[in-house]
Image (spheres, coloured by chain):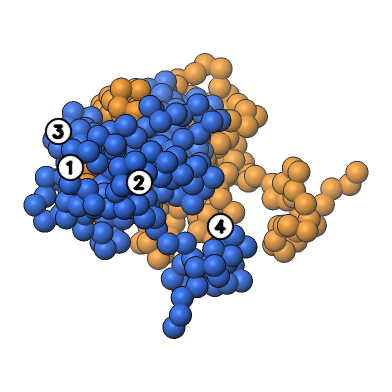
Chain colours: A orange, B blue
Amino acid sequence: MSDAPEEIEALIALMARLPGLGPRSARRAVLHLIKKRSKLLIPLADSMRLVAETARECLRCGNIGTADICGICESPKRATGELCVVEDVADLWAMERAGVFKGRYHVLGGVLSALDAVGPEELRIPRLLERIAEEQISEVILALNATVDGQTTAHYIADQLEPTGVMLTSLAQGVPIGGELDYLDDGTIGAALRARKAL
Amino acid sequence: MSDAPEEIEALIALMARLPGLGPRSARRAVLHLIKKRSKLLIPLADSMRLVAETARECLRCGNIGTADICGICESPKRATGELCVVEDVADLWAMERAGVFKGRYHVLGGVLSALDAVGPEELRIPRLLERIAEEQISEVILALNATVDGQTTAHYIADQLEPTGVMLTSLAQGVPIGGELDYLDDGTIGAALRARKAL
């Protein structure tokens, strides 16, 4: 605590709840905001207000947009037969930045987790099964994080999709581009070796 | 860039200008805000608006408060004879957290810097001289950062204050509490040795 006025302490406490900011960096950020009142603080308050009023989840895929159906789902340029399943909107954005996937997405909104009591109903898994039945989906690509919970979720989805007969694939695991073997964990090296390719 | 709607991209761009957040962490922070719309995003927008409207610099010392004269300057509990000179409000808050200084402050608003073209007029140094003339100041304590610019500023202030005859002191330099010699830089060890005390 400092003896800043309570309005400012309240702002520091809220800022400290952002991922990536702790109490100390929240304090620095707030001082910076007060110094840049007209160039940063007021525009930021207005921008947050606008996003709070306009942002919403796409009813079809769970992406964040400003309409009931998001830009990707609406786009006639996107292939309709392929669905890429991601854990979170951040992962969808990462896929889009890579710019190689031309189909559409399905955002689960998390992964199965016994520890956090997240079951299939908490995620958008039932909606995935509905979409496969309703839309003409030929391939589901699992782009889940290579964590224990991510892989548990992948196996659960694979079980659920088996009766539908849809093709199910998953991102390849291996050495990242530019990666040095010396800095890679044993699991990644093992996966890359098992999935080795003929040159 | 991602293909998030422009309202959200605008918020990400503003958030990325906060110290401690880069483009990637700004993106994560914005997604977090959208998920916690009513618990965090809206309160944060409101809190920023309130701070933008109420926060102002103390006309006397440069501290940030919500009135023309800040709480510390107004407090009858603070000793009036001692002025602690700090670079920035963050440093004032750090001093207050330590809770050992019972006098009042003078915030310079920066340090002299040839590189950034910051001269005495850009800082609150003329105001410091005025305060020493107007208020009954017996001691000025320099609590400036132990950087080159901080020490240059300290020497400049010492030159300016010499004719006033006010007592001028500065924070002691030495080994931090809990500090290990092995991890300290040579300059600190040298300063601690030169300022050694009889046990």
Chain of the residue under the numbered disc 3 shown in the image? B
Question: Residue A193: x, y in percent?
Answer: 80, 57
Q: Is residue B163 left or right of residue A106?
A: left
Q: Residue at x 69, y 50 (%)?
A: A173
Question: Residue A60: x, y in percent?
Answer: 40, 31
Name the foreground residue: B101 vs A108: B101
- Which is closer to the viewer, label 1 or label 2? 1
- Which is closer to the viewer, label 2 or label 4? 2
Residue located beneath label 3 in the image: B68
Q: For marks 1 and 4, give the CA distance.
A: 64 Å
Discs 3, 2: same chain:
yes
> Which quarter of the image is occupied by the N terminus of chain A?
bottom left
Question: Residue B32: x, y in percent?
Answer: 37, 42
Q: Is residue B185 left or right of residue B48?
A: right
Residue located beneath label 1 in the image: B135
Name the foreground residue: A4 vs A119: A4
Residue located beneath label 2 in the image: B86
Question: Residue A47: x, y in percent?
Answer: 32, 25
Discs 3, 4: same chain:
no
Q: For marks 2 and 4, give the CA distance.
A: 48 Å
Q: Residue at x 40, y 65 (%)?
A: A115
Chain of the residue under the numbered disc 4 shown in the image? A
Query: Which of marks 3 and 1 precedes in the sequence?
Result: 3
Around disc 2, counting alpha carbons within 10 Å, would you say few (fewer than 14), some (14 to 19), or many (20 or more)?
Answer: many
Specify the amino acid type for callout 2.
Answer: Val
Discs 1, 2: same chain:
yes
